[in-house]
Image (cartoon, grey):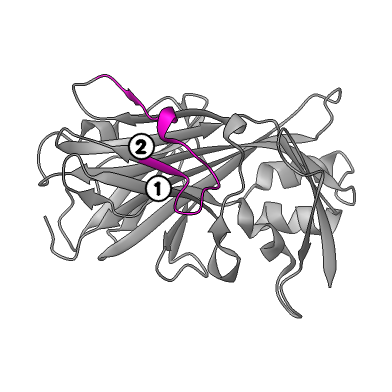
Amino acid sequence: MRFVVEIRGPGVPRRYRGLALLCGLAGASSVAAHDFWVQPNSYWLMPGAAIPITLQVGHGPFRQRSPIPLGRITRFIAIRPGAAAIDLRAGLHPGQADADASVRLRAPGTYVLVLETDAAAQSHLPAIRYNDYLKVEGLTPALDLRARTGRTDADGSENYSRKAKALVQVGPWGGSQAAVTTPVGLSLEIVPEASPYAIPRPGSLPVRVIFAGRPLAGALVKLTNLDHDEAPLETHRTDATGRARFMMPRAGTWLMNVIWTRKLPASRETEFETTFSSLSFGVPAVPR
């Protein structure tokens, strides 16, 4: 089975052709590559060490380096408590053989790396694929709206942007975790209410999802083990206050992600504007 996903945007080929996953795979799997995150080669490192970083997209056999062009990345910074944000854009070089970025963080502490793109890219999918994608990602308001307006059988289209955070520990663990538990101002973001680098194990990891500056209810948040990433390990919908709670992950590298969308005016070329947001972190083998 073959399908065509049309993607438009600066620096993006007009048409991206892919193979649907082999016979019997769920239709929505064809859009799994929407998941996007920032992945340092290590989340725990010594002060001043070079950090190769890749921009990752997809899961399981469809995981790959993201082909996003540099021109779409609008912000790449590092935040730590009590200091000004560090602009990391000079270290970006998407598509190079070794990595997509390289940065050095010299002062000890817990940092949040923040990467943000514009919403210039578009995705166009046949109706059955688009509806499956909305179901899998928990975007029930969009499904309900398409049903109410008689567009369930219409092809789906969206502009989309990426918002990604990664938690990096420089030097020995300790000190303030305020950068981790404070929103950084993304239009959609996952904010831990306790730092995963400070939670005893076993324990629980509470998070809050913020959309357009307000807590977001009803969003589907996924937790994925990046060492075995074919499917999420745990999923929860946010409650009325935008909160969800996960079991504190064991040692390894981990990804949380959430997606939300809003209807665009009829005058726009696409139906929705969708934001993909992620939070990646690494849990050391020895609890801190």
Residue depicted at x 70% and y 36%:
11
Image position, residue 75 (x, y; %): 48, 27
Query: Where is the C terminus found, in terms of image quarters?
Result: bottom left
Residue depicted at x 90% and y 43%:
150
Query: Where is the N terminus found, in terms of image quarters?
Result: bottom right
Image: magenta residue range:
84-102
Kindly state the secondary structure of the residue where label 1 is placed.
strand
State whether residue 219 appears in this view.
no
Disc sitting over residue 113 in the figure: 2
- Which residue extends farthest bottom? 23
Front-most of 145 and 275? 275
Mark 1 lies on residue: 53
In this picture, residue 150 sits left or right of residue 206 = right
Image position, residue 222 (x, y; %): 47, 56
Front-most of 239 and 204? 204
In this picture, residue 126 sits left or right of residue 58 = right
Kindly state the secondary structure of the residue where label 2 is placed.
strand
Disc sitting over residue 210 in the figure: none
Answer whether residue 65 is magenta in the image: no
Depth check, mark 2 against mark 1: the one in front is: 1
- What residue type is disc 1 on? Ile
First of labels 2, 1 by sequence position = 1
* Location of residue 87 (image quadrant): top left
Image position, residue 21 (x, y; %): 71, 72
Q: Main secondary structure of the magenta part?
A: loop
- Which residue extends farthest top? 84
Answer whether residue 95 is magenta in the image: yes
Tags 2 and 1 in contact by the CB under 8 Å rule?
yes
